[in-house]
Amino acid sequence: MTRLFNAPAAFADEALEGFVAAHRRWVRPVSGGVVRSAPAPRGQVAVVIGGGSGHYPAFSGLVGPGLAHGAAVGNVFASPSARQIRTVAEQAHTGGGVLLMFGNYAGDVLHFGQAAEQLNAAGIETRCVSVTDDISSADRADQDKRRGIAGDLPVFKAAAAAAGQGRDLDGVVAAARHANARTRSFGIAFSGCTLPGADHPLFTVAEGRMAVGLGIHGEPGIGEREVPSADGAAELLVSSLLAELPEGVTDPRGERAAVVLNGLGTVKYEELFVVYRRVAQLLAEAGVEVVDPEVGELVTSFDMAGVSLTLCWLDEELEPLWTAGADTPAYRKGEVTAPAPATGSAEEIRTDEPEAAVPAATEASRTAAATVVAALRAIKDTVDTHAEELGRIDAVAGDGDHGIGMRRGSEAAHAAAVRAAEAGAGAGTAVGAAADAWADRAGGTSGALWGVLLHAVGAALGDTEAPTAGTVADGVSEASAAVRRLGGAEVGDKTMVDVLVPFADTLAGAVAGGAALTAAWDRAATAADDAAKATAGLVPRIGRARPHVERSLGTPDAGAHSLALIVRAVHGVLATH
């Protein structure tokens, strides 16, 4: 378990701070992550990787000459926010454009996609490539739905080496996509990981059993079987990967492959070597020639006891990219000429946007902003009370981080609204400030969706008029539509949308029927609670829990449940304001 921590919500920030202090030869801190301590040559494509904390050496440990130019680092098992990603990319960029790379998870897709849009709008040409190497997470026909696990390393490496060769952005993107198409991974685990502050792992398996086909966020496997010997584990890993060859490889005999045997957190190096001994034998028997194998902890999941095997099938283009030199805090290969670190202060380079001037607001709207602050305080308190419960629900078929993320987001949102109100902001500006803060601090899918939700409500409230029941209902209806547009979920997918839609529809119907806001909200909150409970009978059709449909039956969706709790808490504020 994770034993050494201070406040669980501060774990990711403090870990990054300590990492930077230990590795200033390679990295310097920027708001949201790290970049190389010495900038890359002018005009070189910047490869910026990223994801949640808890996977070291991914992602910050892979920044340096020959590998990433920067890494955006999110909360525990949660995507960094779009602002964090954009900030890291701006600092890593040297004029050749930016390639954003990440594992194929909903929160990462949302935030990196938003960051790319913002960077392109600012004149920095930016592309995205997500890694989809895990064969257990979707069928071959749905490879674009697969998640990224330890295959991150060879795919990131191919892109970075291509950038180092001087290829333009199109060429670097092509190399990354080619490497991803030829990379496959499969993993097993004997126990789940324990998040900072938690007193139990995210999943357990019975004595003598192991989970098969798992991710890197503490998710349970897609199945279980008896624990084999080390040789038996090697045989399972190799046979699973040889059963699905990438397009262009019809027979493994005579092929060359990069091989990564990855420890997920607590499997000792000696154990990995015992397993790799048999992996090497099996690949040789299959006629595969191994090129520069890597055995060790490369993409971890806190203290998960497990291993994964990755094969990247090399060709004339990919092999020199895999064997090229690299020099980072956690990954070194061959020789690479590194420029001298930049001189000057080693303090963090902050690139946060300056505080914008508060738009003019009427007295009526400033009064409404006080209600906004009270509502956000109630949301924060409700989330804090239920954070552990939300984490337990999320851990049934997900990564267990929902409580931590919601706590970080709601605390930041409340604090931002307080600052805005104290500066004289109206209701719309106060809610907008809360939206930005929630998305930035929470990260992950829920952070992005709550940011969009609150922005929609804030836009409807505005800063000039006293909010009416109609404007509030309109804002919630637009929030419902905006969340569905961004996240791609619909009712029945087992997400927060299953609560947001009936809540918005019930609120709009009650207001249209002449009900006052408090009474209408009460009716809608009841509908939300009923809808949240009903998600227990659904199976996830999108998102991180999708590969674990059976496990999630009987348990409500964490995002749906938290939304129902929140709207009920807000009703209490409306009743007293």
Image (cartoon, rainbow, N blue to C red):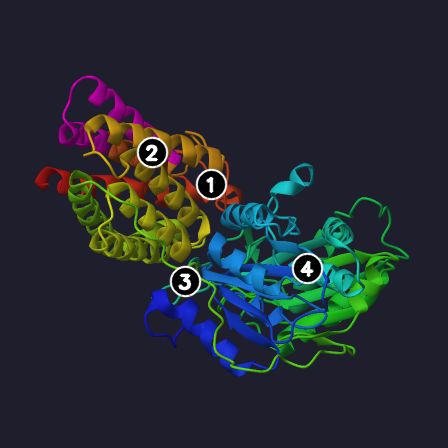
Mark 3: secondary structure: loop
Q: Residue 178: horizontal and vertical position, in percent?
A: 77, 50
Q: Are marks 4 and 1 in contact (CB under 8 Å)?
A: no
513 drawn magenta: yes
Q: Identify the residue shown where x is 33% and y is 45%.
A: 432
- Which amino acid lies under the numbered mark 3 shown in the image of this protein? Pro
Image side of residue 482 versus residue 407, left or right: right
Q: Which numbered disc, 4 or 3, marks the residue that appears first in the sequence? A: 4
Q: Secondary structure at mark 1?
A: helix
What residue is shown at x 77% (from left), y 73% (from top)? 325
What is the C-alpha distance between the residues marked 2 and 4? Answer: 43 Å
Q: Which mark is residue 201?
A: 3
Q: Nearer the viewer, mark 4 or mark 1?
A: 4
Q: Position of residue 214 (x, y in %)?
A: 56, 54
Mark 1 Cα shell of 10 Å, populated few (<14), some (14-19), many (≥20): some
Q: Is any part of residue 554 visible from this angle?
A: no
103 shown above or below 492: below
Percent of width and height locating residue 72? 53, 62
Q: Earlier in the sequence, mark 2 or mark 4?
A: 4
In the rendered structure, find residue 95 and report the number of the disc placed on it: 4
**Which is nearer the eye, 118 or 324?**
118
* Marks 4 and 1, how far apart at CA: 48 Å
Q: CA distance from mark 1 to mark 2?
A: 24 Å
Residue wearing tag 2: 500
* Of labels 1 and 2, the one closer to you: 2
Indicate left or right for 197 with 149 as reference.
Answer: left
**Residue 461 or residue 316, whichever sits in front:** 461
Residue topped by disc 1? 550
